Image: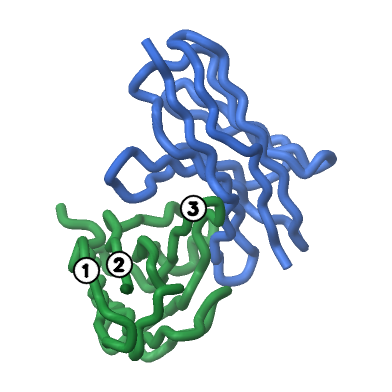
Amino acid sequence: GDSVTQMEGPVTLSEEAFLTINCTYTATGYPSLFWYVQYPGEGLQLLLKATKADDKGSNKGFEATYRKETTSFHLEKGSVQVSDSAVYFCALSDTSYGKLTFGQGTILTVHP
Amino acid sequence: NAGVTQTPKFQVLKTGQSMTLQCAQDMNHEYMSWYRQDPGMGLRLIHYSVGAGITDQGEVPNGYNVSRSTTEDFPLRLLSAAPSQTSVYFCASRSWGQNTGELFFGEGSRLTVL
């Protein structure tokens, strides 16, 4: 079945540091890929998405590129802020009912 | 603009008790789903529905029942709670036919089973 594997956390960075959170997937067909973010005490919200190979999703300074050859969708940001502290989930959507399969989540903490 | 509303936000149960987690959305979304979130496990799909009267099982359905009598509501029932069901539960919805569309989440319901 479909699966998503994220780098293990937690990740702790200083403000303005470069961020990479690795995500790889296993799926049949051609899934859509997503990054969701969960701020403390809240539900998940969509951060960015890519629907086909080589697409780049971007939002709030975050970027991720859909790499079919390496089955990856790594999340990057050039300069993190304290307000980026949250849990980040990589996810894929199957091509039938669009059910989301999530990775285990990566906790990011950014210190001033 | 309510979006997806879950109640209650917190609940403590004893083993064997039953309860219902409520979920309502006001966006006229056809697709609704329930996930549970456990440390190190990410979110796992419990049940989902693609419209009123239609439900199906997800990855971890055992111990949970659902029904979908209206487009707006998708309650999750625990008939006999067990400590293994201690978790944070999220309801989520989206428009049907938009498989690449955004899934909208509620704020979660934290359940503790003693």
Q: Mark 3: few, some, or many residues within 10 Å (few <14, many ≥20)?
A: few
Does label 2 or label 3 sit earlier along the sequence?
A: 3
Does label 2 or label 1 sit earlier along the sequence?
A: 1
Question: Whole-Å distance between the Cαs marked 1 and 3?
Answer: 18 Å
Location of residue B31 with respect to A32 vertically, above or below: below
Farthest residue in the right direction?
A69
Task: Look at the image and give the colour of chain A.
Answer: blue
Same chain letter for marks 1 and 3? yes
Task: Please give left or right for residue B49 compared with residue B40 in the image.
Answer: left
Residue at 43% x, 65% y: name it.
Answer: B36
Q: Chain of mark 3?
A: B
Task: Please give left or right for residue A54 compared with residue A13 in the image.
Answer: right
Contact, CB < 8 Å: mark 2 with mark 1? yes
Identify the residue under disc 2: B111
Same chain letter for marks 2 and 1? yes
Kindly identify which numbered label has been placed on residue B39. Answer: 3
Residue at 50% x, 84% y: name it.
Answer: B62
Query: Residue A85 location, x and y as percent?
Result: 39, 28
Location of residue A4 with respect to B26 vertically, above or below: above
Q: Which chain gets the green colouring?
A: B
Q: Amino acid at mark 1?
A: Gln
Whether residue B25 is visible to the viewer of this picture, yes or no, is yes
Task: Please give left or right for residue A60 compared with residue A57 in the image.
Answer: left
